[in-house]
Amino acid sequence: MDSRDGNRQLRDAGKVSFLIAALCLILSCARSLPDFPQLDLGRFQPEIRKAVEQQADHAKANPRDANQVLQLGMVLQAHDQFQAAAQCYSRAYSLGSKRFETPYFWGQALASMGDYRGAAERLRQALAIRPRSLPARLKLAEVLRESGESASSAELYRQVLNETPENATAHYGLGRSLDGADAITEFGKALALFPRYGAAQFALATAYRKIGETKKAQEALADYERDKTLVPPLDDPEMAAVRALDLSATGLLSQAADLEKEGRLAEALERHNRAIAMDPKLVDAYVNLISLYGRLQRDFEAEQAYHQAIALDPNRAEAYYNFGVFCFERQRLGDAKTAFEAAVGLNPRHAEALHNCAVISEREGKWEQAAALYHRALGIKPSYPLAHFHLGRLYANQKRYALAIQEFERSLEPAGPETPTYLYALAATNARAGARSRAVELMRQARTQAFARGQTALAASIDHDLAALAR
Amino acid sequence: MIWPPWRGSAHRSACVTALAVLLLACGRKPIPWFHDAATETGLQFTHYTGATGQFYMPEIMGSGCALLDYDGDGDLDVFLVQGAALDDPRKTPGNRLFRNELVPSGKFRFTDVTRQAGLHYSGYGMGVATGDFDNDGRVDLLVTNFGENVLYRNNGDGTFRNVIVESPDVALQGRWSTSAAFFDYDRDGWQDLVILNYLDYSIQANKRCYEPAGEIDYCTPKAYPPASAHLFHNEKGRFVEVTQHSGIGHAQGRGLGVVAFDANGDGWQDLYVANDAGANHLWINQKNGAFTERALESGVAYSENGLPKAGMGVAVGDYDNDGAEDLLVLNLMREGATLFRNNGRGDFTDSSLKTGIHAITFPYTGFGVGWFDFDSDGWLDIFLANGAVSLREEQRGRPDPFRERSLLIRNPAGNGGSFVDVTQKAGPAFDLLEVRRGAAFGDIDNDGDIDILVTNNNGPVRLLLNDMPRHNWLEIQVDGAGLGAGMSVTVKASGLPVQRRRVHTDSSYLSASDPRVHFGLGAAERIESVTLYRPDGSQAQHYKNVKLSSLLRIGPERH
């Protein structure tokens, strides 16, 4: 064999190698489609199993339909099956889904699993589709902070605030990335926008503590103790759609709460009953049903729910409180008082229960006791307009006008549907105290606000009193 | 034809590279940093939960372990707490004491001496605390139970005596006791005792709970009312309850982890309690027999976002070598552990995000934990014994769907960087997915590095021996009455910052560790000084010319 044969062999070998390499390259470049997750549904609660199976069947019948796969991911995520959900989103994304929801939900699922790097990547993809999504930007900023990238997190919060300076969550998030006076400023802004932002109050207290402002730290902590878990609402219709798929007992309770707020009481009741069917020892459901049945005028069932609640958990203050309200509305003042006192006994910081005890004491003619109870409630919850109003009215009835005026003034913040009434009371007390021109000015304000809120009957009463003052 | 057909340097380089890769692939694997020596040393023990399928709460909580030199022969023995059948706790394999035969035989093996030692009590065991409560220079034991606790006095002859009748308050009959600690809160020279209680719970009142997909699961502890910790004053070897008088009874929590340490540097021992699903407690010693709860004001009640996390295991240690002990509290998966850095004078900052601890620990549920210098570089690292309490999504349908990896996390060594998860380098023992609970730390084989004893819920004990390459070290043992509890030691070695460590056996979860103090000294050429301090902060002894890589024993006359 001569060198030419050898060279030919080498060239042939080279061609074969090249072809193999090219084939490998093509195969590797071909996007590998993530499989459907393996789902062991055997022990899922039947309703949840049915919902997941249904969607899984749809998805597997249309394995290349990105929307069906996305839907499967959503129903899994609704039930905290984050890994399986992430796999669905990965498949939907690989199928070319251009929907914002796909990388957004994927990022949320990955964040729930602690995969911050992955979550950040997907959230950025979501923002590439919908750059102005506030929930996605806030989530990305949070993920960056949780993964220790505080500078990037701060940058993103600043961008949000440039466009929406009145976002309490962004101010709080930015504050978490800053120190000292800058942090305090941001937490302060968050609280100005949403005064009962528990996490911001805690963060503010921590920041004050760090700079040695002990008294201010203590004041912030007092507010925090009351508002611990309260956060500003966030309009996130995409994640709301996921939560709406939650068929677990707690998910159903959450849906019930939303329905009740919308006045859809029958539907709220149905959700509660489904939750109880799933978990007969779900105390929260029975606690809620006390007031829900009460609103539906189904008194026997309301009492039954109360007894079931305290049988399951004798230490649930809210069960006693709700029953107290139920009894009060039916003029069963003795039962109401017992129930509210039980609630306070279990939770001495239950401002609403203390307030209601005060109202009953007032009805019983026990003025000093009532005043003391109002003060206790207000000591726990200083911005409690109704309590200020009732205390003001008590003082006014005792002709202690200066104190009454003080309390009525405090009842005006934060403003709410009852503010025209409180303003009216303030005006009337000023009139009784001899401050006529002040009374007229306040009555005019009250009338304007009453009209603005469509409270025509109240406005008519105010008009009548204004006419009397003019004579 | 000649082979290989060399044609140019690029081709030659590619072939050489391929050959090198081939050789490396066939070459030796790196030596694991730890290996499990339980079986080879005769440490045969499997924890029993008594699980009945009813998802009773105690079944998921696990039990603890202790490293102690009960016979005073200079090596660490092993005490393992056992569970029981919940319908009849007398039906149980019982707790176990294993004697370490290393000293004097030189053979590293364990022998079950439970019966001879008198420690064969059967109950639903939870935790163990060690300390010298009768000041005879020998280590005693408290075993906590779901049910009645047991107090053992070391007789000094290889046996223990159950002395609960002498301190009946300690029994806390009918309650669920968890972690405990011996500590001298009133500085009278006698070790007092704190015992945590978890829940106001009974088997009869067990609730049925479900995870989000509706499958039955263990309840969150929030389903049950909390309980208060209990404090006992040591009246020369007998304990009297002072819970209400001390103020400790004024706050309730679901207590799981406890450490006694001087949080505010005033020379008096305070208490930190990790409470499950609620605010943690920091009981500041008022120096008059009373304590005041100050966790919220001190920054250690909650994590940075103001929300309570789980709070199971807790470890105390000066991870940044600034002279102030810091706190690490372990939580549930999807919460992340919380690292509270001590700013001095009892003020703490949540540094979990900044140090990377949060991100590393987020996917896990942590129980046993300890600060220990596994690589002897002078900076405290962390081991976390992990295992879930609610079923893990990816293990649904499998038996025991609570298994997790444990973690080994390396300290960035004062460079201001983040902690690093080095678990993958630690060895096959760290690749196991288990339901780990207790962890005790100590130099079990007396080779100058720290090993780890780990318990598994309903599973075998693990003895993780440290096989790291040898660096310089120093260990200090304080002998005599009280065994030096609460004393601290500073060591200055060339090229390293001053390290301050304390003599204590508490922290972690339901467990008790080696009271000897270990210092990693890396490549230091000499030890410049060793200083021993009493619990009140006053200096007891100062040493120079201490030999590198040795055990320094300090006798009672020296402190």
Image: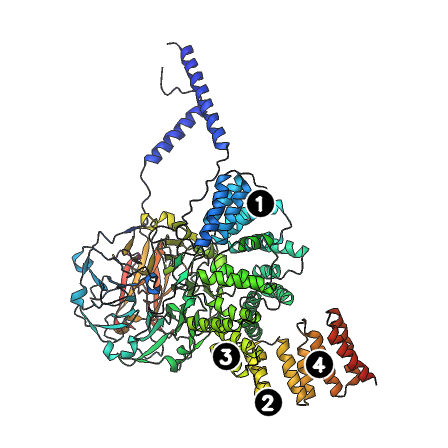
Query: In the rendered view, would you say A193 is above or below A378?
Result: above
In the picture provided, is A198 more to the left or to the right than B288? right
User: Where on the picture, by quarter, is residue B521?
Assistant: bottom left
- Residue at x 57%, y 83% (from the top left corner): A360
Q: Which residue is mark 4?
A: A425
Q: Which mark is residue A125?
A: 1
Q: Which numbered disc, 1 or 4, marks the residue closer to the eye?
A: 4
The reply to the same-chain question for discs 1 and 4 is yes
Q: Which residues are magenta?
A: B446-451
Q: Estimate the spatial distance between the alpha carbons at disc 2 and disc 1, rounded to whole Å.
A: 66 Å
**How many marks do you count on the picture?**
4
The reply to the same-chain question for discs 1 and 3 is yes
Q: Which residue is at the far right?
A: A471
Residue A346, image x, y percentages: 47, 77
Q: Earlier in the sequence, mark 1 or mark 4?
A: 1
Residue in the foreground of this view, choosing between A23 and B113 = A23
Residue in the foreground of this view, choosing between A187 and B230 = B230
Q: Which residue is at the far top?
A: A2
Q: Earlier in the sequence, mark 2 or mark 1?
A: 1
* Element at label 1: helix
Are the two marked residues, 2 and 1, in contact with CB atoms closer than 8 angstroms? no
Q: Which numbered disc, 2 or 1, marks the residue closer to the eye?
A: 2
Letter of the chain that mark 1 sits on in the rendering: A
Q: What's the amino acid at mark 2?
A: Gly
* Element at label 3: helix
Q: Which numbered disc, 1 or 3, marks the residue closer to the eye?
A: 3
* Element at label 2: loop
Letter of the chain that mark 3 sits on in the rendering: A
User: Where on the picture, by quarter, is residue B258?
Assistant: bottom left
Q: Which residue is mark 2?
A: A365
In the picture provided, is A401 more to the left or to the right than A96? right
Are the two marked residues, 4 and 2, in contact with CB atoms closer than 8 angstroms? no
